[in-house]
Image (cartoon, coloured by chain):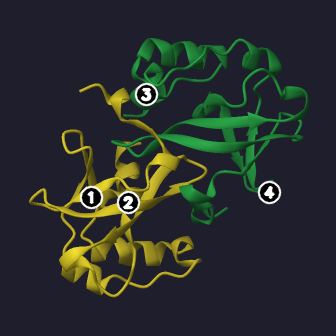
Chain colours: A green, B yellow
Amino acid sequence: MNPEMTMLETSKVPGTSVYGASRESIGEVDDLIVDTVSGKVRYAVLSFGGFLGLGKSSYVIPWTSLKWDQELNGYVTGVTEEQLKSSPDLDPTSLRSRDFEQRLHTNYGAPSYWDLETRTN
Amino acid sequence: MNPEMTMLETSKVPGTSVYGASRESIGEVDDLIVDTVSGKVRYAVLSFGGFLGLGKSSYVIPWTSLKWDQELNGYVTGVTEEQLKSSPDLDPTSLRSRDFEQRLHTNYGAPSYWDLETRTN
């Protein structure tokens, strides 16, 4: 696969499909959250329909919980209804706290990006 | 500085200010172009006003030409009017070509992200 096939304007990201572990459609991407310094996406804001339509309208999910699938032209994730239900509530300052970020990653069983980057540098 | 201060929804990126080498306001960010696999921003789509208002309405600039400035709450870039004038035209498939990407980075004197990432991995 040519990685350049996957360049996308972030303005076109909303509406990108999200699939579950069994490759069933479960929702879509509403937004991405990027670190403006490094230019790395850290979180995705997802909305779910159907059985995953729970209390909140959207969920902030660690980027490391998502994997691009070129064939599906969308993201595949293993997040579960339990994880969505137990996810901590965010306020506008939540992502300034590494403790909060850790809780969020732990909730989703997602590798923390700061560990991954320490390892590769 | 706390790097978590810099988390931003990509939907809020349009309108972010861009400053020139002397920290004068020269334009704004219209969009970002992200690699959907790695989640890394590769290019920014910028528009310029004033003396940099040239033939095109927007320009695709390598991400490595921009540096976030927390104090200015925007990006600083050293791109020149000459570089904008000599920048190659894009069509929707241009960024699938590494040769084109190389030309674009060379035009702006910007380090190529694929070299940077080979070095750090």
Q: Circle 1 marks a residue in which chain?
A: B
Dividing the picture into quadrants, the one containing residue A104 is top right
For the residues tagged 4 and 2, is the chain the same?
A: no
User: Residue B121: x, y in percent?
Assistant: 41, 42
Mark identifier at residue A119: 3
**Earlier along the polypeptide chain: callout 1 or callout 2?**
1
Q: Residue furthest left?
A: B22
Residue of label 2:
B29
Determine contact: label 4, label 1, CB under 8 Å: no
Q: CA distance from mark 4 to mark 1?
A: 37 Å
* Amino acid at pointer 4: Glu
Dividing the picture into quadrants, the one containing residue B57 is bottom left
Q: Nearer the viewer, residue B15 or A78?
A: B15
Residue of label 1:
B18
Q: Circle 2 marks a residue in which chain?
A: B
**Side of A35 relative to A66 (left or right):** left
* Amino acid at pointer 3: Arg
Query: Residue at point 87% right, 41% down?
Result: A23
